[in-house]
């Protein structure tokens, strides 16, 4: 099978996917997202691939290109609707709430005044996040009113797209770690603990990865979460709380190069197998 990989940069994760495609006996079709222009008035696209795996670093690129390809008859994984839901934290929350998936409490505001009121009503501490973004960037832990006023003023003054929506999440006191589960077609194939003395535990920010056993509770939570956002291959960030596991965020184009070794699971191979199975069912 000819398998396309749509990418903007070749990182360690993409190299693992390239190798997994060739190891499985398929033909790799490299599709650099920044080296091609697309005619909008053409009915079909001859990419030379039966299925395309999206690995764009930019969620904006992934959204535009995946929808364009799908409208031209190209099979893309993850699907446009999955990318759209998962790349925006507000859309993710709405989908999870509808499916009754447990998440930390969130409020959304559209002015600094209403955001401050929401924070005061929720109670400190809270975390203020952009609705889009990854790698733990632009997060602020707010522990009192003075800090809230300062962060909100900075965001309002900066005034860019990332700062024009005030996404406020109740802080969850983690036990020095969180969990990242790797989910393919609804199945949690493996998971890691991300340990860090810092409240942000992303491995991109220095969090240490170690194997986390997939419990029945985690497996059920991941299956429900996957169904809520449209399936595919996903990374789910999970918090351990006194009331059980809760979903914090979902990544539709996860990085996994630091997770295959501690889990002894070929996440890249599972992604390729999923893409092949979807193409064969078409």
Image (cartoon, helix red, strand yellow):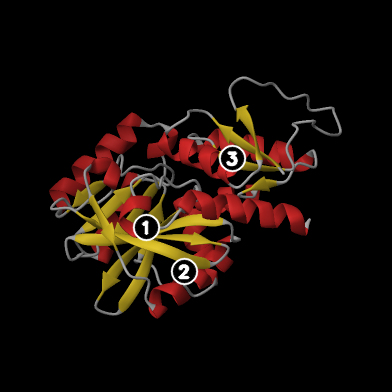
Crowding around mark 2 (Cα neighbors within 10 Å: few <14, some 14 to 19, many 20+) is many
- Residue 174 at x, y = what percent? 21, 64
Q: Residue at x 24, y 42 (%)?
A: 205
Q: Left of 114 or right of it: where is 75?
A: right
Residue reaching furthest to the right: 43
**Label 1 or label 3, whichever comes before in sequence order:** 3
- Camera sees residue 114: no
- Residue 89 at x, y = what percent? 45, 52
Q: Quadrant of the C terminus?
A: bottom right
Say whether marks 2 and 3 touch (CB < 8 Å). Answer: no
Disc 2: which residue: 222
**Label 2 or label 1, whichever comes before in sequence order:** 2
The answer to which image quadrant residue 219 occupies is bottom left
Q: Residue at x 80, y 30 (%)?
A: 46
Crowding around mark 1 (Cα neighbors within 10 Å: few <14, some 14 to 19, many 20+) is few
* Residue nearest the observer in this picture, 190 or 73: 190
Q: Between tags 2 and 1, which lies in front?
A: 1
- Camera sees residue 104: yes
Q: Left of 180 or right of it: where is 99?
A: right
Query: Alpha-carbon distance for marks 2 and 3?
Result: 29 Å
Secondary structure type for disc 3: helix
Q: Quadrant of the N terminus?
A: top right
Q: Which disc, if any, is residue 264?
A: 1
Q: Which disc, if any, is residue 22?
A: 3
* Residue nearest the observer in this picture, 81 or 53: 53
Query: Alpha-carbon distance for marks 1 and 3?
Result: 20 Å
Crowding around mark 3 (Cα neighbors within 10 Å: few <14, some 14 to 19, many 20+) is few
- Residue 141 at x, y = what percent? 21, 50
The answer to which image quadrant residue 28 occupies is top right
Secondary structure type for disc 2: helix
């Amino acid at each position: 099978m000819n398998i396309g990989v749509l990418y903007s940069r070749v990182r360690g994760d993409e190299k693992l996917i390239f190798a997994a495609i060739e190891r499985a006996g398929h033909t790799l079709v490299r599709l650099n997202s920044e080296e091609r222009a697309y005619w909008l008035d053409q009915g079909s696209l001859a990419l030379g691939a039966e299925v395309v795996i999206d690995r764009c670093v930019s969620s904006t690129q992934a959204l535009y290109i995946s929808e364009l390809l799908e409208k031209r008859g190209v099979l893309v994984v993850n699907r446009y609707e999955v990318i759209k839901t998962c790349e925006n934290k507000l859309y993710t929350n709405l989908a999870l709430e509808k499916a009754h998936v447990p998440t930390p409490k969130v409020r959304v505001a559209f002015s600094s005044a209403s955001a401050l009121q929401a924070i005061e009503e929720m109670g400190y501490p809270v975390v203020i996040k952009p609705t889009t973004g990854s790698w733990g960037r632009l997060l602020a832990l707010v522990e009192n009113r003075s800090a809230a006023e300062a962060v909100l003023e900075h965001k309002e003054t900066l005034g860019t797209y990332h700062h024009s929506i005030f996404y406020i999440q109740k802080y969850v006191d983690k036990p020095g770690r969180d969990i990242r589960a790797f989910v393919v077609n609804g199945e949690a194939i493996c998971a890691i603990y991300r340990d860090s003395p810092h409240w942000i535990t992303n491995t991109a920010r220095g969090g240490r990865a170690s194997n986390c056993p997939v419990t029945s509770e985690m497996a059920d939570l991941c299956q429900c979460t996957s169904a809520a956002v449209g399936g595919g291959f996903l990374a789910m960030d999970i918090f351990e709380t006194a009331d059980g596991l809760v979903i914090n965020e979902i990544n539709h184009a996860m990085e996994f190069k630091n997770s295959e070794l501690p889990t002894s699971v070929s996440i890249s191979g599972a992604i390729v197998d999923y893409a092949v199975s979807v193409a064969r069912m078409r």
